[in-house]
Image: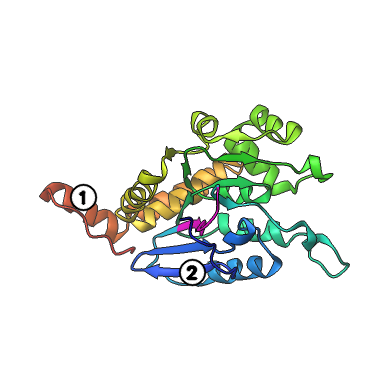
Amino acid sequence: MTALPSPSTTPELSINDAVATLRINRPDKRNRLQTEDLHTLIAHGQRINDDPAIRVVVLTANTTGQPRPVFCSGYDIGGFDGEDQDTRLFEQTVQALAALRPVVVGALNGSVYGGATDMALACDLRVGLSGSEFRMPAAALGLHYYPSGLRRYVANFGVNAARLAFLTARPMSAQTLLDAGVLHEVRDSDQFLATVAALVADVSRLAPLAAQATKRSLSEIAHGLYDEERLLQRQSTTLKSEDFLEGRNAFTERRKPVFQGR
């Protein structure tokens, strides 16, 4: 018997040691985001950034009871109605997700539509569910997409694949996204959680100063913001860190390093 969807609520944040999990939680509405959800995601992001113990963030969704899993069907376009609506709130939310200090793993346990595709691209690493799809219907709804989202699409897909996504509004399969490098792994439902857990464990074992600095540098390079002096400064900081000393000692002593993030 198919489980019934859980009642809709704003996104949930749970923290387990170094791992924070952000879960979109409107399965009965195909996880469509409301304005209050965006404010909640921004607040959760601030809490994550304020906790230096958090090294990894997992972005996922509650898909309980859905006949075909949908990670997120995007932003409720009704949120654009009314003169008092902030039309840039969704973009600000995705930008806040992209700017999170820890490494973000997108556990995309269903299909991804509309603005939610940009949320997925804001993650640093992405695992997709077999049989799921991406679709960007902005132009089919009469909308020119916001600038940072277009830039993120081009950075991840390349300009020609981004054209295909935006100028046809055709769905793209998980396999297509894997072949393009947009998804880093694709798994069936029985392997999905274990794959995400293994990826999170790998990231958690990294030196957090180095991983988080490298995350920022890679993002800047991908968006054409290369600044060699800034990158060299980050390298210098890690060279002087206790974590780098611990990493060298652990390598010499043939043991696993214990990084403290300093």
Residue 253 appears anywhere in the view: yes
Name above or below for residue 37 compared with residue 114.
below
User: Residue 55 location in percent, x, y?
Assistant: 39, 60
Residue reaching furthest front?
1
Residue 52 appears anywhere in the view: no
Residue occupied by mark 1:
248
Residue positioned 68% across, 34% down in the render? 165
Residue occupied by mark 2:
13
Q: Quadrant of residue 173?
A: top right
Q: Quadrant of residue 135?
A: top right
Range drawn in magenta: 58-67
**Secondary-structure class at tag 1:** helix
Of residues 35 and 213, the one drawn nearer to the viewer in this rendering: 35
User: Residue 128 location in percent, x, y?
Assistant: 48, 42
Q: Which mark is residue 210?
A: none
User: Residue 50 location in percent, x, y?
Assistant: 48, 72
User: Residue 170 location in percent, x, y?
Assistant: 69, 33
Q: Residues within 10 Å of mark 2 (few under 14, many from 20)?
A: some
Q: Amino acid at mark 2?
A: Leu
Of residues 35 and 1, the one drawn nearer to the viewer in this rendering: 1
Q: Amino acid at mark 1?
A: Arg
